[in-house]
Image (spheres, helix red, strand yellow):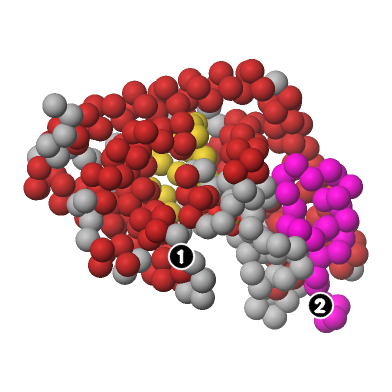
Amino acid sequence: MTRLSAITPSGHAHLGNHLGAIRRWAREGSAGDLYFVSDLHAMTVSYNPSRLRVLSRELLAVLLAAGIKPDRVFVQSDLVRELGALSWVLECTCSFGEAARMTQFKQRADGQGTVRLGLLTYPVLMAADILLQGATEVPVGQDQTQHVELARSLARRFNTTFGEVFVVPRAVMAPTAARVMDLSDPTRKMSKSTQDNAGVVFLLDEPDLVRRKLMRAVTDNENRLEYRPTTQPGLANLLEILAACVGRSPIEMADEYSSYGELKEAVAEAVVEELAPLRASTLELLDDPADLDAIRAAGAERARERGQHVLESALRMAGLSG
Ligand code: ATP
């Protein structure tokens, strides 16, 4: 079994990425799991090239610092030639209607003056990511299941039309881990691409800044320390963060504190403690560019080798490559 997961360098990694995904990947990952930094996917909207390069390296360092094995990680653009070739073959297997039907495309394109063609074709690139690595399972949230369905259809269509090449992947629901909400607006999830940084705890924030952000988190005037996500979303978010850090339940945590201030202090300390080793190891990796480059190159080589046979067969069956 090969399970493939990705994280997009559309901004700095944050507490939500850590508690909701990265920490679990590092703890529960099995030998067949693969993780990649999906920098090509960050190009579907306006972006800054030098920032993208910095963010991709940073995310790679975060994944390694979290404890994911170096031979399980790679950066997507290190395979840009292979993915570009396979994407073209898959684009010619995909109809315009299929791509245009993607709900996420419609949502993300809606209201934008200029829509990059890459935003339309990005699910096909995602199919190339999956099929090149021969992934059998793709853990996804609800918003991505349609994209994995597309990858399945393209794989099957190619296999029936030209010959059996691709493993047909299936979407598996990513286990529900903590869903961390924005500290300034607890009705929306903490996100890398939020403009206002006050509500987002970045993994590399200085401990004092982490404390300040958590102490200023929006709560309510009810003065009632209970876990009630619908009516007290800000408080519930803090309880969930604390629970995820200390490995207990949010309801239990609500019983432990008598004031919002006391709770916030406890959350701040728990988060600082949770992030300290990750932050230190990430900074250490970023401090040694040669070492990180070597790990990155080895990861790319392994990912390329994994996909080489599939790519060569797909190109040959499609009538290319001699
Ligand atoms: P973001 O909005 O931060 O860019 P995303 O889900 O759009 O997040 P990804 O790069 O795909 O972008 O996220 C990587 C992983 O982090 C995914 O598994 C996603 O579910 C998880 N994740 C992102 N934000 C949160 C959050 N606020 N709480 C919990 N998990 C999160």
- The kind of residue tagged 2 is Asp
In percent of width and height, residue 166 lies at: 21, 40
Asked whether, in this view, residue 273 is left or right of residue 149, the answer is right
Where, by quadrant of the figure, is residue 263 drawn? bottom right
Where, by quadrant of the figure, is residue 264 drawn? bottom right
Q: Nearer the viewer, residue 111 or 36?
A: 111
Give the residue at mark 1.
115
In percent of width and height, residue 104 lies at: 43, 66
Instruction: State which image quarter holds ligand 1.
Output: bottom right
Asked whether, in this view, residue 229 is left or right of residue 149, the answer is right
Identify the residue at image location x=47%, y=49%: 41
Asked whether, in this view, residue 279 is left or right of residue 140, the answer is right
Spatial separation of the CA atoms under disc 2 and disc 1: 39 Å
Depth check, mark 2 against mark 1: the one in front is 1
Q: Quadrant of the C terminus?
A: top left
Q: Is residue 27 visible?
A: no
Beta carbon of the mark 2 residue lies under 8 A of ligand 1: no
Q: Quadrant of the N terminus?
A: top left
Q: Nearer the viewer, residue 138 or 204?
A: 204
Q: Nearer the viewer, residue 143 or 222?
A: 143
In percent of width and height, residue 187 lies at: 66, 73
Q: Which mark is residue 220?
A: 2
Asked whether, in this view, residue 211 is left or right of residue 72, the answer is right
Secondary structure, mark 1, is loop
Q: Is residue 311 visible?
A: yes
| Range shown magenta | 197-224
Mark 2 or 1, nearer chain start: 1
In percent of width and height, residue 125 lies at: 36, 48
Q: Residues within 10 Å of mark 2 (few under 14, many from 20)?
A: few
Q: Residues within 10 Å of mark 1 (few under 14, many from 20)?
A: some
Was residue 222 drawn as part of the magenta stretch in this picture? yes
Identify the residue at image location x=76%, y=58%: 197
